[in-house]
Image: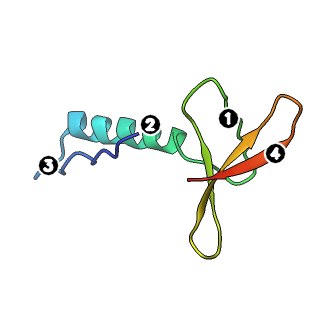
Amino acid sequence: MSRRTLPAATATYDFSSTSQLINELEIRDGQSFKVGERIELNGQDDTQLILISADGTKFKLQVSDTGTLSTTEV
C-alpha cells in the first residue's frame, strides 16, 4: 500500500475541503490497528505479518493448515 498525503488546507473555510479531509481521516483510521482489536490475516491475499528482532532482522510469520507457526527471514 502506498502512502497518500492529506489535502492541503484552504485559505478560507470550505465545506467541500473539510468534508474531503474528514472522509480521508475516516478511511485512514479504518486502516490502522486499535488496542484490543482482533486482527485476522487471510492467507489468500498479499497481507503479511513481519516481526522485527532486537537486532533489526525481519521475519515473516507463517502458519500451516495444522496451526504450526514458522518464520522466514525477509
Between 23 and 31, the residue placed more toward the observer is 31
Residue beneath the point at 87% across and 36% down: 67
What numbered label is drawn on residue 71? none
Where's the N terminus, which quadrant? top left
For residue 8, side relative to residue 45 (left or right): left
Residue type, mark 4 in image: Leu
Q: In this view, does 1 lie above or below 53?
A: above
Q: Residue 69 carries which label?
A: 4
Specify the color scheme. rainbow
Badge 1 crowding class, 10 Å Cα cut-off, few under 14, some 14 to 19, many 20 or more, is few
Q: Distance between the residues labelled 2 and 3?
A: 21 Å
Task: Tell me whether circle 3 and circle 4 mark residues in contact (CB < 8 Å).
Answer: no
The amino acid beneath tag 1 is Leu
Can you identify the residue that label 2 sits on?
Answer: 27
- Residue 29 image offset from top left, x and y in percent: 50, 44
Task: Residue under label 1, please give it.
Answer: 41
Q: Are marks 3 and 1 in contact (CB under 8 Å)?
A: no
Determine the CA span between mark 4 and mark 1.
Answer: 14 Å
Q: Distance between the residues labelled 3 and 1?
A: 39 Å
Q: In this rendering, which labeled residue sits more in front, label 4 or label 2?
A: 4
Q: In the rendered view, does 10 fall on the left or right side of 44?
A: left
